[in-house]
Each structure stands twice: as structure tokens, then as C-alpha cells.
Amino acid sequence: MPIDAAKALAAPPRTGEISWNSKDVQLYHLGIGAGVPATDPDELRYTLESRLHVLPSFATVAGSGAPGVIGGLSMPGIEVDLARVLHGGQHLTVHRPLPTEGTATATHRIAGLYDKGKAAVLVLRTDVADADGPLWTNDAEIFIRGEGGFGGDRGPSVRLEPPAGEPDRVLERPLREDQALLYRLSGDWNPLHADPEFAKRAGFDRPILHGLCTYGITLKAVVDTLLDGDVTRVRSYRTRFAGVVHPGETLRIRAWSGEGSVRVAVSAADRADAPVLTDTIVEHT
């Protein structure tokens, strides 16, 4: 059986040490489009080591400490074809600001395995802490086509009512043709984002952008325009990946400000605003 739910949920956590430095942070920031214009003081906070701060979404790649899609499939009880797998959602909780370099312990476990009928959803949780205590918690929701029907719980519903009224900000972020090739250098080597033949086997006409790249681009846009450029104000950030993005396209980001939170919707401007990120919230101080 490709998925053994009982075995997967009963598996003990995996723990290992991760580390990162300012070069890793800078590479991640470049991979999500930072540094344009190159001499803009606001952009230098993402690219110049003497001014560097860390966008919280760096936690999804720090030290390759979050196994993500590929790592989640190596957990006990999970044996499926990578071509049938998509990243369904992400939820990051920040316990304190991320340092520009560090060493920490990452603990991975399967926090949920849900039966959606025609698909299974695997929730992989990563808790990261250093000598001073907890740093962040990442939940990656992995959608596995054709692996439902094993008789499990359907899981909680996370769908939100659409934001009311006109957005407070409408932003556009053009993507580079090589955006996925640059972003994957931060550690996500899924061939879906680089190999045209693999992409076709997975049902796409060409490689697609990592959902977590769009995730980082969106958080940066919110921080820069609605949180005064202060990365330390972010407390949590969650989204559902609702559609694909191709390198070279333009993202349209709509944001609604509320008390302590920002609701966001992201679409592909080049494809009649096809949804890309939905059910998206940035909670902040």
C-alpha cells in the first residue's frame, strides 16, 4: 500500500541539526526577487550583509531544515510517485526574529494525514529551536493525487470567506524567466521546477515556479508596503496554493489591512487573474 496511515502517524519524530549564514539568507532573498533596484536602500536590507535582516519565510529553506515536498515523502508509511505530488499549503509561525546566521535543532514529524477521496493530504510539521529556545514552526501541506480512499479522516476545513471591499494595496511583481532556477539553489531540488520532461510527466506543459517562491515574494511585498519594512513584526503567515505560476509571468498581489493582520490574494496577471494563493493571512504586531 503506497500510504500506510497508521505507520505514518505513529512514526517517531526525526531530529537533526541545521545551520545557515548570511550568504544563505542573501541567496534566498535574491531568489524571491529582492535587489531591484540594486542600490535602493530598502532593497539593501535584503542583499547587503552589513544591513541584512531576515524575511521570516526564509524559515522554509533555512539549513534545508524543512524537508518540504521531497523530504515528506521519505517519512515512514509514505511511498508515492513524486510526479503525483503538489505542495498544497504552508503555515509558518514565528516565535522570535530569525537571526542572519545560526545553528539550531529541527524536529520533523507527520502532524496529520487526511483522506480527501481522490487524494491524500500529508501535513509535515517542523519545529526549530536554538540554544535560546523556539525559533519557528512550519507546517507543509502536501497534496498527493490518487492516494485517497484509505478510510481516513477528511481533516479540518481551512477555507476562508473572501475579504470584503476594495483592497488597500494592489501590487504587481514581475518574475524572471530564470526565477525557479535561481530559487531552487536555496535547497528545493524538485525537478518539476527545472526539467521540462518531468514537468510534462506531472501534467504541466513546462516547469512551474515553486509555490514557496511565490509565498516569499508575497510576504516581502506585504512587509515592504504595509509593515513599514519591519520583518520582526510578522508573527505568522499561512496560505493555500490554488494555482500554478510560470517563470516570466507577473504576480498581482491584492492586500486588505485589518487590525493585527493582512488578508492577501495573489493571481497571475497574465492569465486573466487566475488564482495562485488563496486563504492567505499575515498576522503581525
Image (tube, rainbow, N blue to C red):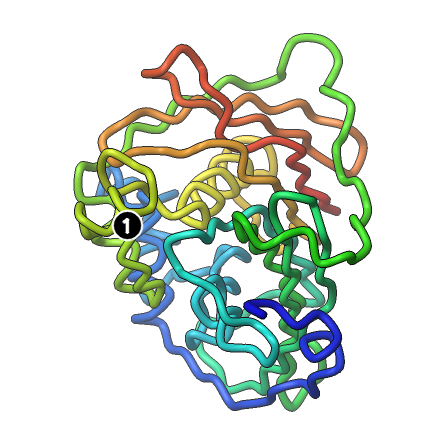
- Residue 121 in percent (x, y) is at 64, 54
Residue closest to the far front: 1
Please tell me whether residue 9 is drawn above or below residue 240 in the rendered image: below
Quadrant in the rendering for residue 21: bottom left
- Residue 10 in percent (x, y) is at 75, 81
Question: Number of labelled discs?
Answer: 1
- Residue 209 in percent (x, y) is at 33, 43
Q: Is residue 153 left or right of residue 276?
A: right
Quadrant in the rendering for residue 11: bottom right
Residue at the spot 54% in from the left edge and 53% down from the top edge: 144
Residue at the spot 36% in from the left edge and 28% down from the top edge: 173
Camera-side residue of 244 and 222: 244
Residue at the spot 61% in from the left edge and 68% down from the top edge: 3
Q: Amino acid at mark 1?
A: His
Disc 1 target residue = 193
Please tell me whether residue 127 is drawn above or below residue 153 in the rendered image: below
Q: Is residue 179 left or right of residue 225?
A: left
Quadrant in the rendering for residue 269: top left
Q: Quadrant of the N terminus?
A: bottom right
Camera-side residue of 29 and 269: 269
Q: Residues within 10 Å of mark 1 (few under 14, many from 20)?
A: many
